[in-house]
Image (spheres, coloured by chain):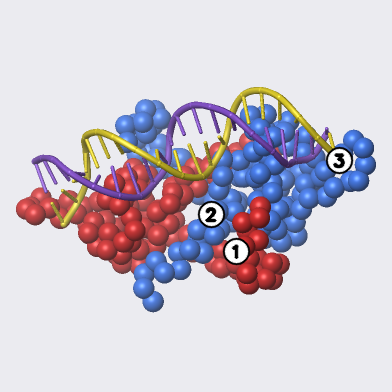
Chain colours: A red, B blue, C purple, D yellow
Amino acid sequence: MTTGENCGELQVALDIIVGKWKPIILFHLMENEKLRFSELQRAIPEITKKMLTSQLRELEYNDIVHRKVYQQVPPKVEYSMSPYGHGLKPLLVSMRSWGTEHLEHLEKLYGKDNEEQKEQI
Amino acid sequence: MTTGENCGELQVALDIIVGKWKPIILFHLMENEKLRFSELQRAIPEITKKMLTSQLRELEYNDIVHRKVYQQVPPKVEYSMSPYGHGLKPLLVSMRSWGTEHLEHLEKLYGKDNEEQKEQI
DNA sequence: CTGAATCCCCAGGGATACTG
DNA sequence: CAGTATCCCTGGGGATTCAG
């Protein structure tokens, strides 16, 4: 087996949770059970409808989130983690804690004002 | 605590391993102990020098990989996982296995020919 | 051999307006 | 309310060239 051969699978996993908005969307859905489209919008004020829609659609395609449409007027749509999607939570949590520790590590390396140094790359 | 508040940490973790080439670079370095610049190039033929350099620089800044320069002519540079960087391996491996399982899951959902359907999003 | 510097392109997002 | 549809712009990468 050549090295890095099965790296595509990692990429697959990344594609699910990468995207400017997917992480925050996922955390909101992890902590809130059910959220309407407008609730997600209010929770993430900077996101546009277009982006929210597309990110949710991708997550839905990957069976991470479930989309429940209430046939009524005015429309009502609820998003939630799918049963399968819950299997992603441990990974999400692990990544978040690694990120937290990494921030501290960077601080040790470069000091508190590491933002400027980051620019210099 | 408002929901999604600490999502930035997840983003931090993602920024490390995201990038078209970082995953494959990391797997090569995980499995090979030490690799020269040109060896990485040969291992990943499609990558350009520019990209390889920039991705390695970012990984180096984050103390994931170590860069050892031999002061000699012709130049020789060896890249390897840093001691700290090894702490990322479990996460990488977890993500890869999740990715593997997810591919099977998608296959169950959409069948073997899921590439076409993916286009339809 | 290991990069740095330039130029260039296009797809991923943002802003805005419209619709069932 | 929950999206589409359009237009537009930026920057992440690719190709190529130069350099120590």
Residue on which the image places disc 3: B76
Q: To which quarter of the image does residue C11 belong?
A: top left
**Residue A87 rendering spot, x and y as whole percentages:** 43, 56
Query: In this image, A7 relative to A19: left or right?
Result: right
Q: To which quarter of the image does residue B1 belong?
A: bottom left
Q: Is residue A99 above or below residue B65?
A: below
> In the drawing, what numbered circle is on residue B14?
2
Assign the N terminus of chain A to one quadrant of the image. top right
Q: Residues within 10 Å of mark 2 (few under 14, many from 20)?
A: many
Given the image, on which type of amino acid does mark 1 rest? Glu
Dot 1 lies on which element? helix
Given the image, on which type of amino acid does mark 3 rest? Lys
Q: Residue at x 35, y 63 (%)?
A: A28
Q: Residue at x 63, y 36 (%)?
A: A5
**Residue A70 rendering spot, x and y as whole percentages:** 13, 53
**Residue B83 rendering spot, x and y as whole percentages:** 75, 60
> In the drawing, what numbered circle is on residue A115?
1
> In the drawing, what numbered circle is on residue B92?
none
